Amino acid sequence: MAHQITKLDNGITVLSENIEYVRTISIGAWIKAGSRNDPTPLPGLAHFLEHMLFKGTKTRTKFEIAHFLESRGGAMNAYTAREYTTIYARILAINLKDAIEIISDIVLNSRFREPEIEKEKTVVLDEIQDSLDTPTELIHNKFYEKIFPEHPLSHQITGNAENITNIKKADLINFVKNNYTTDKLIISASGLLNHDELVQYVEKAFDDLPRSSKKTSLERIPTVKEQTFTFSNKANKQNHICTGVQTFAFDDERRLPLLVLNSIFSAGMSSRFFQNIREKHGITYALSSFTDFYMDSGCFYVYCSSAPKNTKKCLELIREELNKISKNSITDSELATVKALLKSSLVMALESTSSRMNRLAKQFMYMKSITSIDEVIKKINKVKKEDIFRLAKELFQKKNFVTTILKS
């Protein structure tokens, strides 16, 4: 099940992994343009465009787009992230050519009709309102606003109501022109497939996709200092908290030690947060830590919810656990357990063609190469306690923490 990589003459990258014991294929078109690429006056444009791709092309109505793969037993969808947009499908292996054709059609031939634009604004505005009504999502968005202040990474992926109502057809056309180009497109597929056949289909289907010689530079990530921001939502019954620090890029060699460190805190019921905060003190139900990585930066943060009277205590206990980790407090047994959990989660994901397809695309997008799962496991095994202590001391300094609290 070795992966294969082909760079087409026009700049498109095609990745695949053949799995002979399945009968399906997961395929995705990964465009290296997400909310980070939104024009300054219109945050949310990349996400809105993703919606509009499904609203009709030169030859298909929106129903025909929705029906095309479903009539063959497949499914197609899309999502927007901060640094990319993905259009993906899960299909029977015999329908690979059809999946590539429909994906290329909406990428190349979407019409962006004015009535559909106005109608979809209402849908996206409702999506934005849903996020405002969901405290967990709202506090995560607030945390991003403050951990990457005045930077495109801080923008809510869906944008805000005012920006969405201002979107025009010309904005969509310009975004496609600037970002939907061969050098920014990765086609990734996993399942019962032939790589050469996949390359042939992609080459033909995306032949009209324009090239781009335009160089894009990344905006400097702003430094942050210790600060706490409080927001109010009277509809809440609980307080919601995010606290964390900036870290480093996806391709940084410290990424795997940080993933191991993250697992120590919140991987499973034997993790430190679960045992030392939830079980021992019983003052929170939802408590997890997260790692996000980007082209040039990243963040580590902890989320929890609690009754207002317990919020201060929750924060104190979280910081106590973060501080404790840098003081040679990891046992050999604990390290072996979290490594086993991390490795098993990676291996278990291999049972899904969708996870495999995603892994191929992300690895290549951020690393320019693909590391086998066996190599990743070897690297995890090599992570030492000293690596974790050093990293914790570097990151978990009081001056580095940004905290956001959504009060009831």
Image: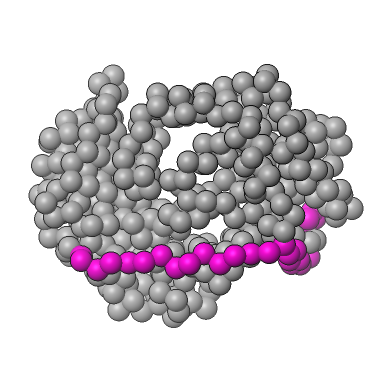
Whether residue 169 sits left or right of residue 407 in the image: it is left
Identify the coloring.
one colour
Quadrant hosting residue 131: bottom right
Q: Which residues are magenta?
A: 212-239
Observer-nearest of 170 and 258:
258
Q: Residue at x 52, y 78 (%)?
A: 162
Magenta stretch: includes residue 342: no
336 or 130: nearer the viewer: 336
Q: Establish if 403 lies above or below 379.
A: below
Q: Percent x, y for residue 178?
A: 27, 69
Q: Which quarter shows the N terminus?
A: top left
Could you say where residue 160 lies in the image, as x and y percent from the top left? 53, 71
Q: Residue at x 85, y 37 (%)?
A: 282
> Which image quadrant is residue 367 in?
top left
Residue 100 in sight from this viewpoint: no
Q: Position of residue 275 (x, y in %)?
A: 78, 30
Q: Nearer the viewer, residue 104 or 179?
A: 179
Q: Is residue 32 left or right of residue 162?
A: left
Is residue 29 in view? yes
Vertical relation: 124 (above or below) 238: below
Return the x and y of residue 96 as percentages of the image width and height.
Answer: 20, 38
Question: In the orientation shown, which residue stands out farthest toward the right?
Answer: 309
Q: Main secondary structure of the magenta part?
A: loop
> In the picture provided, is 260 more to the left or to the right than 249?
right
Task: Name the residue located 12 percent from the left edge and 60 percent from the top edge.
Answer: 208
What residue sits 72% from the left and 62% below the top?
A: 226
Judge from the rendering whether residue 153 lies leftward or rightward of residue 107; answer left or right. right
Q: How many marks?
A: 0
Quarter occupied by the C terminus: bottom right
Report if residue 215 lies within the magenta region. Answer: yes
